[in-house]
Image (spheres, rainbow, N blue to C red):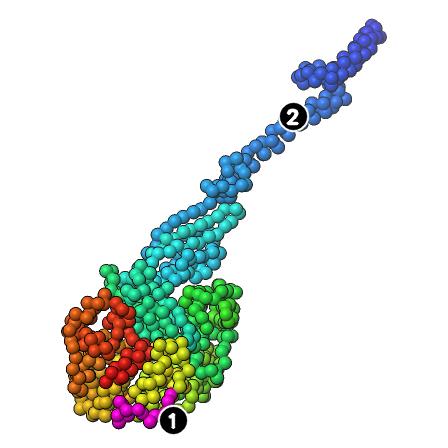
């Protein structure tokens, strides 16, 4: 029985196994060719049999397609689809890309800002406060459209130079994005700044420069009142200065404006680098020691105006330069080079340290001055040195003595390393030695004194030898008059065979000429005007004017000796002087109607001017103009007074 049962089971197995194998083979082929049979059906067919080999084979067939179909499509594509587009979306505004993610910049992506700024003359304002701070101030490019109105430093600090309006532009760029700031700057003179501005100017001997370019051009040049306080510089009614001789002068331009008085001051140096001595070699390489926030003005060192040079600073983190004014300012500790390239190239080495101090002082003539007041410690703790011994010397006690006109520095080095540097300007030293102890002219200390000896009879031919001037050939209309007046001892030159024909005439000098022509120069004045220094070379001559009451332009008992005389005052004083010596005149003022500016003559002076015109003593500046308020040059004065001299 058992044997029959076993036989039946074996027979069943023999029948079932081939069938199952055939089915599995058909299923595998069908799955590879059509890929349509579901995995669940396969599992249902194989799991009841629990065949290990069939289970492994099925596992391989199902896992690989699943990994390829699920992991790659879901993980990798998802990363690309979510992260990268998000990154592009956030960067686009910063890099100025378009909404499509393009890297091409457009006008909409640039930064452009306009702003109005109001400042006063001499006022400073830092424009860096109004721009994007993602750039440092030195990373911006700062430009001014008109540096004579507004100057700007390499760090964006502007300074009002004169009344007017201009544009200052700051630009920078990053990753194709441009940043541009336009500042519309208006400069006005306010009461807080006294409506004034100061500028340093250098002009060569016989050279000219138009100062009108530095003032408010809303007004005509002739609207300003131009004055120079020293005859080394003359200034015309239109603001053109001329260097007469080496030296320094202050030229002012004033004007009454509805908003207040406008006043400009020009510190003018005639000659090269402020030096009045040809024996002093020009210095073009300088070294300065500045404390933090110290400034050095190198404009007087330069041969030309600061804005005529191309400036460069090697390290603007250490120092910066105001190119319009020639002022170098310390920024932070360190060393840097500043160059100014022009007709002559200048090199400045700038050392900045908190232990340095920079000062300035001036010396007049060959006098001495101590530097002690600039020092924090005792004098004997310092060592002193001069960088230009041909200009000045300094002894071990810190006493500085002028040698020649010019600029030099004194270095005061303390034993602990502190440095005090003093920039010294020496002036008032004549080029040639003189033994005279009495000043005989406001224009030079090297005048031939024989020309000042008053003639006993100025109307007779003087025994003084003829004088030859070498600077009057360009004024041929005046050469004969100048020669005649000089030969008769009535007028003098300015030294070294020079007459300075284009220099304006001072009131005190005209007093000398007038009293000599009138023959009253030997009078003794009992009293004088309140502003005449006792012992001055012109004191007695002006005293005679006071004694005879023939002055003009007098207020509060002041003669104003150093001011330049006007044509009207010359005519009035000449008329009064001639009347005081017995001359009579036709005072009919109808002749003034022939002149378009006849009404400009001050009330009460019309008869005096008319008398000289009627008598043929003077003529106008043209057939229709008198210009009574105009200043008169030495050449013009010589011609006018020579005519008076010949008439009487």
Q: Quadrant of the N terminus?
A: top right
Q: Where is residue 386 in the image (x, y as percent from the top left)?
A: 47, 83
| Residue at image mark 2 | 69
Label 1, secondary structure: give it: loop
Q: Is residue 459 magenta?
A: yes
Query: Which one is nearer the viewer's eye here, 426 or 471?
Result: 471
Q: From which residue to which does the magenta span run?
A: 454-467
The residue positioned 81% from the left and 12% from the top of the image is 18
Nearer to me, 114 or 445: 445
Q: Is residue 514 left or right of residue 52?
A: left
Residue at left 25%, top 76%? 618
Main SS of the magenta part reads loop
**Which residue does the image show at 16% across and 72% down from the upper left?**
589
Query: Label 2's element?
Result: helix
- Assess disc 1: are there few (<14), some (14-19) or many (≥20) residues with their C-alpha within 10 Å of its C-alpha: few
Distance CA(mark 2)–CA(mark 1): 115 Å
Q: Residue 435 — which label?
A: 1
**Residue 187, picture quadrant:** bottom left
Residue 26 lies, with reference to residue 545, above or below; the image says above
Q: Quadrant of residue 379 in the image?
A: bottom left
In the rendered image, residue 571 lying in the magenta stretch gets the answer no
């Amino acid at each position: 029985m058992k044997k029959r049962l076993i036989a039946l089971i074996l027979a069943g197995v023999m029948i079932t196994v081939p069938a199952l194998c055939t089915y599995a083979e058909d299923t595998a082929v069908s799955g590879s060719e059509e890929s349509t049979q579901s995995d669940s059906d396969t599992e249902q067919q194989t799991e009841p049999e629990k065949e290990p080999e069939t289970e492994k084979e099925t596992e391989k067939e199902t896992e690989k397609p699943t990994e390829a179909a699920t992991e790659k499509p879901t993980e990798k594509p998802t990363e690309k689809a979510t992260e990268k587009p998000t990154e592009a979306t956030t960067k686009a505004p910063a890099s100025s890309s378009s909404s499509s993610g393009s890297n091409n910049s457009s006008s909409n992506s640039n930064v452009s800002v306009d702003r109005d700024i109001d400042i006063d003359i001499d006022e400073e304002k830092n424009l860096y406060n109004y721009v994007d701070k993602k750039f440092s101030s030195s990373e911006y490019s700062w430009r001014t459209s008109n540096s004579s109105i507004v100057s700007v430093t390499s760090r964006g600090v502007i300074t009002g130079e004169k009344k007017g309006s201009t544009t200052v532009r700051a630009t920078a760029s990053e990753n194709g994005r441009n940043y541009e700031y336009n500042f519309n700057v208006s400069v006005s003179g306010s009461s807080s700044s006294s409506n004034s501005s100061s500028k340093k100017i250098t002009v060569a001997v016989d050279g000219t420069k138009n100062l009108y370019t530095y003032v408010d051009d809303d007004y005509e040049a002739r609207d300003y009142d131009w004055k120079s306080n020293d005859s080394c510089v003359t200034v015309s009614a239109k603001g053109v200065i001329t260097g007469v001789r080496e030296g320094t002068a202050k030229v002012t331009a004033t004007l009454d404006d509805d908003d207040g008085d406008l006043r400009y001051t020009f510190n003018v140096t005639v000659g090269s680098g402020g030096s009045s001595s040809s024996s002093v070699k020009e210095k073009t390489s300088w070294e300065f020691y500045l404390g933090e926030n110290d400034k050095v003005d190198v404009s007087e060192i330069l041969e030309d105006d600061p804005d005529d040079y191309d400036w460069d600073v090697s390290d603007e983190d250490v120092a910066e330069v105001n190119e319009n004014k020639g002022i170098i300012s310390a920024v932070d500790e360190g060393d840097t080079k500043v160059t100014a390239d022009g007709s002559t190239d200048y090199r400045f080495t700038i050392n900045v340290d908190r232990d340095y101090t920079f000062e300035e002082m001036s010396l007049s003539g060959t006098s001495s001055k101590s530097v002690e007041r600039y020092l924090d410690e005792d004098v004997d703790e310092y060592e002193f040195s001069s960088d230009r011994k041909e200009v000045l010397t300094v002894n071990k006690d810190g006493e500085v003595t002028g040698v020649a006109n010019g600029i030099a520095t004194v270095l005061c080095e303390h034993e602990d390393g502190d440095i005090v540097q003093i920039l010294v300007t020496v002036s008032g030293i004549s080029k040639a030695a003189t033994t005279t102890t009495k000043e005989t002219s406001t224009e030079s200390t090297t005048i031939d004194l024989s020309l000042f000896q008053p003639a006993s009879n100025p109307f007779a031919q003087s025994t003084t030898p003829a004088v030859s001037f070498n600077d009057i050939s360009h004024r041929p209309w005046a050469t004969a008059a100048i020669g005649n007046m000089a030969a008769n001892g009535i007028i003098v030159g300015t030294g070294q065979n020079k007459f300075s024909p284009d220099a304006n005439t001072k009131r005190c000098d005209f007093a000398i000429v007038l009293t000599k022509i009138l023959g009253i120069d030997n009078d003794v004045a009992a009293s004088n005007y309140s502003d005449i220094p006792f012992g001055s070379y012109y004191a007695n001559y002006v005293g005679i004017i006071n004694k005879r009451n023939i002055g003009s332009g007098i207020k509060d008992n002041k003669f104003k000796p150093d001011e330049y005389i006007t044509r009207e005052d010359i005519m009035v004083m000449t008329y009064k002087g001639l009347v005081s010596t017995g001359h009579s005149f036709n005072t009919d003022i109808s002749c003034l109607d022939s002149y378009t500016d006849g009404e400009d003559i001050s009330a009460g002076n019309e008869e005096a001017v008319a008398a000289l015109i009627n008598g043929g003593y003077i003529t106008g500046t043209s057939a229709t103009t008198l210009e009574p308020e105009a200043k008169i040059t030495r050449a013009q004065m010589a011609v006018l007074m020579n005519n008076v001299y010949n008439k009487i």
